[in-house]
Amino acid sequence: DIITSPRSQVYYLATEYGVVNLIGKSTWERAEAIISLAHPMFRDQLVRAAQAQHIWRRSNKR
């Protein structure tokens, strides 16, 4: 069985690299928050993928 969840249902996301609250975030803010939880080895690759999809905008935090 395939189970999907729309992005509007995901409020908190946790990995071994932290926890983020996704409530009320724009698409690019969600991308940035989710990438911040990825293994550091994959973050640049994820940023490039988000840029290719035109959903990445680097904030002052990074």
Image (spheres, rainbow, N blue to C red):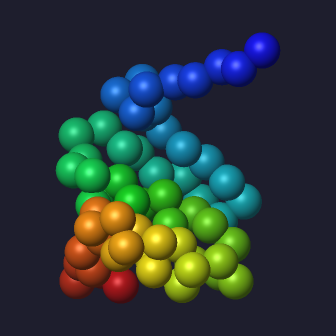
> Can residue 16 be seen by looking at this rendering?
yes
- Tally of marks: 0
What residue is rendered at 53% in x and 72% in y? 46
Direction top: furthest residue: 1
| Residue 50, position as x, y percentages in the image | 40, 68
- Relative side of 5 to 1, left or right: left
Residue 3, placed above or below residue 33: above
What residue is rendered at 37% in x and 44% in y? 22
For the residue pair 19 and 29, the one nearer the viewer reads as 29
Q: Quadrant of residue 29?
A: bottom left
What residue is rendered at 40% in x and 45% in y? 21
Residue 6, placed above or below residue 32: above
What residue is rendered at 52% in x and 24% in y? 5
Q: Quadrant of residue 7?
A: top left
- Relative side of 51 to 6, left or right: left
> Can residue 36 be seen by looking at this rendering?
no
Direction right: furthest residue: 1
| Residue 28, position as x, y percentages in the image | 27, 61
| Residue 26, position as x, y percentages in the image | 21, 50
Quadrant containing the N terminus is: top right
Residue 46, placed above or below residue 34: below
Quadrant containing the C terminus is: bottom left
Q: Quadrant of residue 10?
A: top left
For the residue pair 46 and 34, the one nearer the viewer reads as 46
- Relative side of 16 to 4, left or right: right
Direction front: furthest residue: 52
For the residue pair 44 and 12, the one nearer the viewer reads as 44
